Amino acid sequence: MTWAVISTWKMSWKGCTLAADLLRQGLRGSEAVIRGIQDVEDNPEFRSVGYGGLPDEEGRVLLDGAFMNGDSLHFGAVAAMEGFRSPIAVAHSLAKYDFNNFLAGKGAEKYAAENGFERRNNLTEESRAIYEKKRGESQSLSAYDGHDTVCFAVLDQMGSMYTGVSTSGLFLKKCGRVGDSPVAGSGFYADSRLGAACATGVGEEIMKGVLSYNALRNLKAGMSPQEAAETAVSELSETLIQRNGKARSMSLILLDNRGNFGVGTNIRFPFVYAAETSSSTLYLAEAENGRCRITPVEDKDSLDID
Ligand code: GLY
């Protein structure tokens, strides 16, 4: 059986290549999602996820993460969780239950502590320094400054599909603010009979269009993966421009259940894709008249976006 993996941003290159190796060996897609995302969560150079993530307005790194099993439709999610290494690992663990799948704040931290998840102070000296420098200037920050979610969608050799996401959310967000990432349907969705999708960008915009689920509905209606993804993003963008005068950044990755990918964006958006028939490749998607121009990036170092 074929396999495939797609992930958001250049920062996921190493994690995506690792996930592809696991899928090639026939491991479960859940393992590939977790290991791929943890590679990003553990890297302090990426300031929008895990260790080294940028803090909220009180200087605390509060993390969101989610995992979904496309066979059973079970999901697990954590929001505003502080002091633990891996939101994706905790979210994955929560997906095995029938109730209490989405835990926030103190509840998420209590569950993680009781179940032996590794603790970590995710605020690095570098992130603290950026916070100290910028907090006085917070009025001039745009909502998207310094923030991107790592998202993975996977098809494994057993035909099962999974998604996972992890983020520190908006830099200087209000204490307790939660974006789209841990919200099923908006930040992620997986159904092994159809496909898997996940989103990155400004959560407040993505949630207005329940973006990931909506893209899969397009797939179900008969669109190709590329049409399904770009239509979901462009229709939501258009609606927001009509109603509010502007649409903030949003991007979406999608796999169908045969491993074909689709991507939608209203910005310049790098992503990584690997499959049985194609080694890990970094692509750049660029919004163009409601469609997406997608080009492979030969020289990763030349790309100015992480
Ligand atoms: N997309 C992640 C967030 O808005 O927090």
Image (cartoon, rainbow, N blue to C red):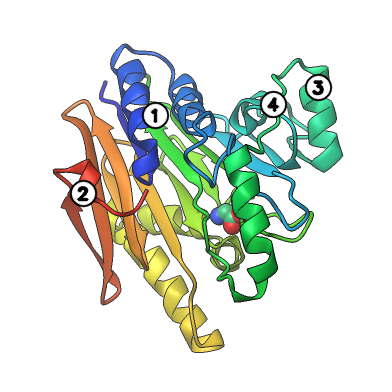
Give the residue at x 24% y 42%.
282
Residue nearest the viewer, comparing 252 with 267: 267
Name the image quarter holding the N terminus. Answer: top left
Left or right side of 21 for 205? right
- The local secondary structure at tag 4 comes to loop
Left or right side of 243 for 111? right
Residue 53 drawn at (x, y percent): 59, 43
Find disc 4 in the rendering and name its residue: 120
Q: What's the amino acid at mark 2?
A: Ser
Disc 3, ligand 1: is the CB inside 8 Å?
no
- The local secondary structure at tag 1 comes to helix
Q: Residues within 10 Å of mark 3 (few under 14, many from 20)?
A: some
Left or right side of 28 for 141? right
Circles 3, 2 touching at the beta carbon (< 8 Å): no
- State the mark number for residue 302: 2
Q: Earlier in the sequence, mark 1 or mark 3?
A: 1
